[in-house]
């Protein structure tokens, strides 16, 4: 597991088995919000950040260097956004 800019990338098959109640990077996955082609989006809670959106790549997507690169780029772009209507 590597962590950068508040995101964690796991390259093992465990990404396919995450569910509400699991803890990733200090965030408790509260509930599934959406499921898409490359993974699952969860509502997450952290002791110092009450609410967050946590995207977990599927095991298949995590094996693709291109998908992981786009995932990292997305995280960097989202981290750079600054607007009163966005939660940090």
Image (cartoon, rainbow, N blue to C red):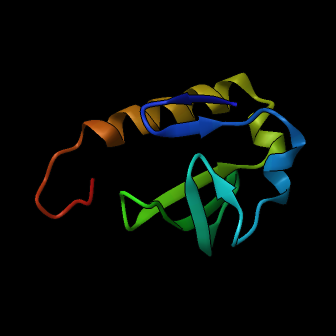
The residue at 77%/49% (across/down) is 58
**Residue at 46% from the left image edge and 60% from the top image edge:** 46
The quarter holding residue 49 reads bottom left
Residue 79 on image: x %, y %: 32, 39
The residue that appears at 23% across and 43% down in the rendered structure is: 81
The residue at 55%/57% (across/down) is 27
Q: Position of residue 55 (x, y in %)?
A: 58, 53
Residue 68 versus residue 79: which sits nearer the camera? 79
Q: Would you say 58 lies left or right of 25 here?
A: right
Residue lying at the far front of the rendered structure: 47
Q: Is residue 82 left or right of residue 5?
A: left
- Is residue 73 shown above or below 40? above
The x, y position of residue 67, in whole percent, is 65, 33
- Measured from the top left, where is residue 20 in percent x and y? 69, 72
Tell me if residue 46 comes above or below residue 33 in the rendering.
Answer: above
Please give the count of numbered marks on the rendered protein. Answer: 0
Task: Name the one closer to the observer, 21 or 40.
Answer: 21
Q: Residue furthest right?
A: 13
Residue 33 in sight: no
- Give the quadrant of residue 30: bottom right
Picture quarter with the N terminus: top right
Residue 16 appears in the figure: yes
């Amino acid at each position: 597991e590597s962590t950068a800019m508040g995101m964690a990338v796991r390259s093992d098959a465990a990404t396919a088995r995450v569910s509400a109640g699991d803890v990733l990077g200090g965030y408790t996955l509260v509930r599934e919000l959406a499921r898409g082609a490359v993974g699952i989006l969860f509502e997450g809670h952290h002791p110092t950040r009450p609410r967050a959106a946590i995207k977990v790549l599927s095991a298949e997507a995590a094996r693709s260097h291109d998908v992981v690169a786009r995932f990292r780029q997305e995280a960097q772009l989202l981290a750079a956004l600054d607007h009163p209507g966005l939660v940090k």
